[in-house]
Image (spheres, rainbow, N blue to C red):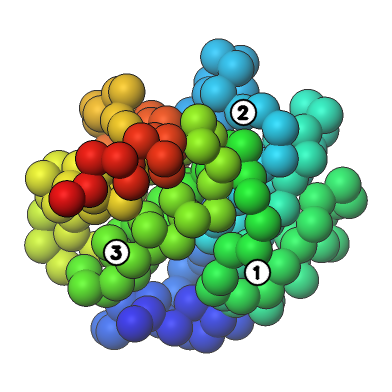
Amino acid sequence: MVDFEGFYRGGELVEGVPHTGVPWDIGAPQPIVVAWEAAGRFRGHVLDAGCGTGDNALFLASRGLRVTGVDIAPTAISTARSRGDGVEWVVGSSFTGQFDTVLASALFHCLPVEERPGLMVALRNAAVDGALLNLTSLAVEGGPFEVSAAELRAAVEDAGWEITRFGSDVIPVAGVDDLPTLPVWVVEATAASRSACAATTP
């Protein structure tokens, strides 16, 4: 697994690639998160899973939402705390609570392939029935962060999420020469009723 704590401290993200900054730390919320908020796709208690340095979480809190930001890297959480108040910051890799909305911005591709389905299950377990999921994942070919549409769709649906939109877009990144954006998969989904799922399980 990638050493994200080491990366936030200045180490390499991928072996042989010099550290030139945290590419997803653009100093502002991701535009797609802003668009989701404007479209009403955040409500109630929001989980920002893999919140990084916190700009998405802080933006959502500024819009009056209750937000919990969770990240495995203590340095990322420390940076997030220094940027603003109004968010419950948690260092860890588990999600405790029952959330009305789940944001997974550029998180799915960070895990090894064999751990990605478990991530989606963990996010579903932390969500109430009917909760909204807003997810982006890199849509690149080759390398440790490769994610196919089929892999992502299967992981989301098998975990108990009903996809309402599956598409593609780009996200801005910083500090990557001649590469201002990266392609991503975009998923919008709703947490299926657990009782309905149980009734249809043989």
**Tags 2 and 1 touching, CB below 8 Å:** no
Q: Is residue 87 left or right of residue 167?
A: right
Asked if residue 131 is positioned above or below residue 114 in the image, the reply reads above
Rounded to the nearest angstrom, the CA distance separating label 3 from label 2 is 23 Å
Amino acid carrying mark 3 in the image: Arg
Of the image marks 2 and 1, the number of the one nearer the N terminus: 2
Which residue sits at x=15%, y=43%? 149
Q: Position of residue 119 (x, y in %)?
A: 38, 62
Pinpoint residue 114: horizontal percent, then vertical percent.
21, 73
- Please report whichever mark, 3 or 2, sits nearer to the chain's N-terminal start: 2
Q: Crowding at label 3, few (<14), some or many (≥20) Cα neighbours within 10 Å?
A: many
Q: How far separated are the C-alphas under marks 2 and 1?
A: 23 Å
Amino acid type, residue under disc 2 in the picture? Phe
Q: Horizontal placement of 59 versus 172: left or right?
A: right
What amino acid type should be assigned to the residue bearing mark 1? Ala
Residue 141 % position (x, y):
11, 54
**Farthest residue toward the right?**
85
**Label 3, on which residue?**
116
Residue at 17% from the left image edge and 50% from the top image edge? 202
State whether residue 126 appears in this view: yes
Q: Is the C-beta separation of discs 3 and 1 under 8 Å?
A: no
Q: Is residue 95 above or below residue 180?
A: below
> Dot 2, how many residues are within 10 Å of its Cα: few (below 14), some (14-19), or many (20+)?
many
Q: Identify residue for label 2.
A: 42
For disc 1, the marked residue is: 76
The Cα–Cα distance between marks 3 and 1, rounded to whole angstroms, is 21 Å
